[in-house]
Amino acid sequence: MDPAAPAPSPAPDPAPPRQDPRRLLLKNTAILALGQLIGAPMSMIVTAVVGRFLGSASYGEMTIAGTWVTLGFLFVDWGQSQLMAGEIARDRSKAGTLLGTSLVWRVVAAVLIYGLMASYGGLSGNSREFQVILLLMTVQWLIVSFTTATLDAIRGLERTDISAYQNILQPLLRLLVVVPALALLHWKVRGAILAQSAVYLLLLGYVWRARAQVGIKPLQFRIETLRAFFKPGTAFLFFGLAMVAQPFIDAEWLHRRAPLEVAGWNASARKLLEPLIMPVAVIGGPLYPTLSRLHLEDRAAFVTTLRSAIRGILILAFPLALSCYFYGDVGVWLYGKKEYAGAITNLKYLAPFLFLMYFSMPLGVSILAAQRQKAWSAVQFICVAVSAILDPILIPLFQRKSGNGSLGVCVAAVVSEVFMVAFGIKLAEKGVFDRKFAGAFARTAAAGAAMAAVAVLLEKLGLPSLAAAPIALVTYGVVLWAVGGLAGEQMDAVLGGIKRRLKR
């Protein structure tokens, strides 16, 4: 062999074998669900402790500042999170460049966005305390933004285990850091934000190390990659704006037309919805990159995978929405019923909203995966328009009638979500909603009706919610099993996966 001859270049790593999309989705969903199942109770407790120690007024003010920062950081993200996951799922070699470019952009954009928010806050006459909270939350969100971008890049590799571990670590660290800061050191709003920022910094360290381990390196910044982000990312930006503009409008009108305590009730009710939304969010995470790939490779598998996911979600929609309506006082107890009593009524009004979200979220994921961002963004803006029209009418009305103007926000949210589901069904791929879906819906509705009847009966008998809720949920499960609602392909897939694990 000629020593002067160049060494042969190593053969590229073979592409990982493609798995059955439904099995891959089931696996990724199970991993995320396990992480959420462990982490969600801790997260709910920590959030409730923050609300309890700060009080409804301070908690409401912090939440209002949070809606500002959430809106601002949409421009920092510029649709890159969803875009990056989908692009990496299609071409894994782009991971390092996409992530590196995104992180550089986020630092520059965050500084600019904070300047605009601070200027608007000064012109709006907000207090100095509010401006300080705004600064602290901007720093916190920049840390979170780095973590989220890195997780999105890892998610593009169809790896959900890192996100699952992060979902456990985050509430655990908050429990160990934030709760003592409030309960023992008696820190207030500023201290709570600083303590949470320290937690997010630790999480960023963990995710950053995981990023290298899964092979997203080296990171590179390329101006052409940044330019390539903007055009498709703008569609995601408008979609995000439509989603975030609605709670921003709600918070601003509550700030102007109702006491801060009412904003605190609304914030606590929304936070209590988060663990109930968790199952559909867990499914949506791995669903997006899988559907993005299938939309290019196999349209029939795209429809089959989406249809399977929605039927599985349907089983959860009824019992969780009914639990929100009948047993919201269980969650409000964590915050303190005396300080947050109004939130119990909020949860009753938000139960239909929760039910509808179990359809709008997977439909939205499928529409985005099919690269129809503009159409879905237009639907979102219709919902923003609904809130912009109804909020100034309903908030003062409910404030006068019941002393809880945030109920007007809840009604507007339900109306908006009806539009979301209706348009989502219209934009969905043909074949998703068939006769089998109609049959599955009828069976789960029958089980839901039985659960509601039992809940009403137990309420009349005076049984406490903590005792009544398990009985009502068991009723739902038994009736669903009796009418054949637990014998579909989803349950077969789950049981088959468990059997395979046990044989190993």
Image: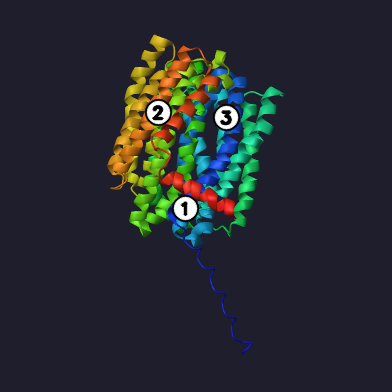
Real-space Cα separation, disc 2 to disc 3, in angstroms: 25 Å
Where residue 78 appears, as percent x and y from the top left, is 44, 45
Q: Residue at x 41, y 21 (%)?
A: 453
**Secondary structure type for disc 1:** helix
Where residue 324 appears, as percent x and y from the top left, is 46, 25
Above or below residue 197? Residue 287 is below
Real-space Cα separation, disc 1 to disc 2, in angstroms: 28 Å
Q: Are marks 1 and 2 in contact (CB under 8 Å)?
A: no
Mark positioned earlier in the residue sequence (1 or 2):
1
Mark positioned earlier in the residue sequence (1 or 3):
1
**Secondary structure type for disc 2:** helix
Mark positioned earlier in the residue sequence (2 or 3):
3
Which disc number belongs to residue 149? none
Task: Return the residue nearer the eye: 137 or 300.
Answer: 300
Task: Return the residue nearer the eye: 232 or 52.
Answer: 52
Question: Can residue 503 be spotted in the picture?
Answer: yes
State the residue position of label 1. Answer: 23
State the residue position of label 3. Answer: 44
Q: Nearer the viewer, mark 1 or mark 3?
A: 1
The type of residue carrying mark 1 is Arg
The type of residue carrying mark 2 is Gly
State the residue position of label 2. Answer: 448
Q: Nearer the viewer, mark 1 or mark 2?
A: 2
Q: Where, quadrant-wise, is the N terminus in this rendering? A: bottom right
Real-space Cα separation, disc 1 to disc 3, in angstroms: 31 Å
Q: Residue at x 41, y 19 (%)?
A: 407
Q: Residue at x 50, y 17 (%)?
A: 260
Return the residue found at the far right: 184
**Secondary structure type for disc 3:** helix
Q: Are marks 2 and 3 in contact (CB under 8 Å)?
A: no
Label 1 neighbour load within 10 Å: few <14, some 14-19, many 20+: some
